[in-house]
Image: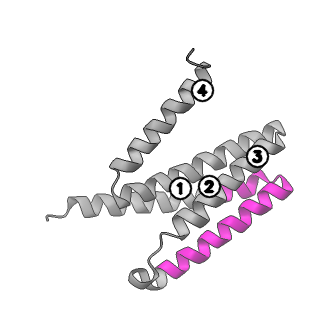
Amino acid sequence: MFGSSANRASAYARVGVETGVTAANPHKLVLMLFDGALASISVAGAAMERKDIPAKGQAVSRAIEIIANGLSASLDKEAGGELAFRLEALYEYMTDRLLHANLRNDPAALEEVAGLLRQLREAWEGIGEQVGAQPA
């Protein structure tokens, strides 16, 4: 009648994500993109260890999608100036490394990209805390 517990959990997770996106400000949305890319890379690494090629490919593709069509596409090159262009180049490098990781089963390349994303996420989170602490 209600489907499997996995289907119910998946539906619940989708609703939670959709609700989080609807309620999030632009700063939080970028944090969610970082979190999604990191989660996908983690899934790819686990699939790589299990030699689950389809799951690895899907997870790497999801991470690339988030980086290229989420993080990179959200850059405002007019307002961001040179920093935005440098971030765009870094995101492109990350997608290249993820492709390499997928094709060569290279967990070190996955970890390299994850490390870069964690550093950027930490910096982005710090910017939000500074902006939130300033008086209106």
Instruction: Confirm or deny contact between disc 1 and disc 2 (CB under 8 A).
Output: yes
Amino acid at circle 1: Arg
Mark 1 Cα-neighbour bin, 10 Å: few <14, some 14–19, many ≥20: some
Choose mark 1 or mark 4, whichever is in front: 4
Circle 3: residue type: Lys
Which residue corresponds to mark 3? 56
Q: Is mark 2 on a helix, strand or loop?
A: helix
**Magenta segment, prevailing SS (helix, strand or loop):** helix
Name the spot of residue 136 as percent of width and height, x first.
14, 65
Which callout, 4 or 3, points to the residue nearer the camera?
Answer: 4
| In-image side of 109 versus 28 (left or right) | right
131 in magenta:
no
Q: What element carries label 3?
A: helix
- Farthest top residue in view: 1
Kindly identify which numbered label has been placed on residue 118: 1
Residue occupied by mark 4 = 7
Q: Nearer the viewer, residue 64 or 1?
A: 1
User: How crowded is the residue under tag 4: few (<14 C-alpha within 10 Å), some, or many (20+)?
Assistant: few
Q: Give me the C-alpha separation between circle 1 and circle 4.
A: 30 Å
Q: How far apart are marks 4 and 2 (CA)?
A: 29 Å
- Residue 114: mark in rendering: 2
Give the Cα distance between marks 3 and 1. Answer: 20 Å
Specify the amino acid type for callout 4.
Asn
C-alpha span from label 4 to label 3: 21 Å
C-beta proximity under 8 Å, tags 4 and 2: no
In which quadrant of the rendered image does the N terminus lie? top right
The amino acid type, in three-letter code, at marker 2 is Ala
Q: Earlier in the sequence, mark 4 or mark 3?
A: 4
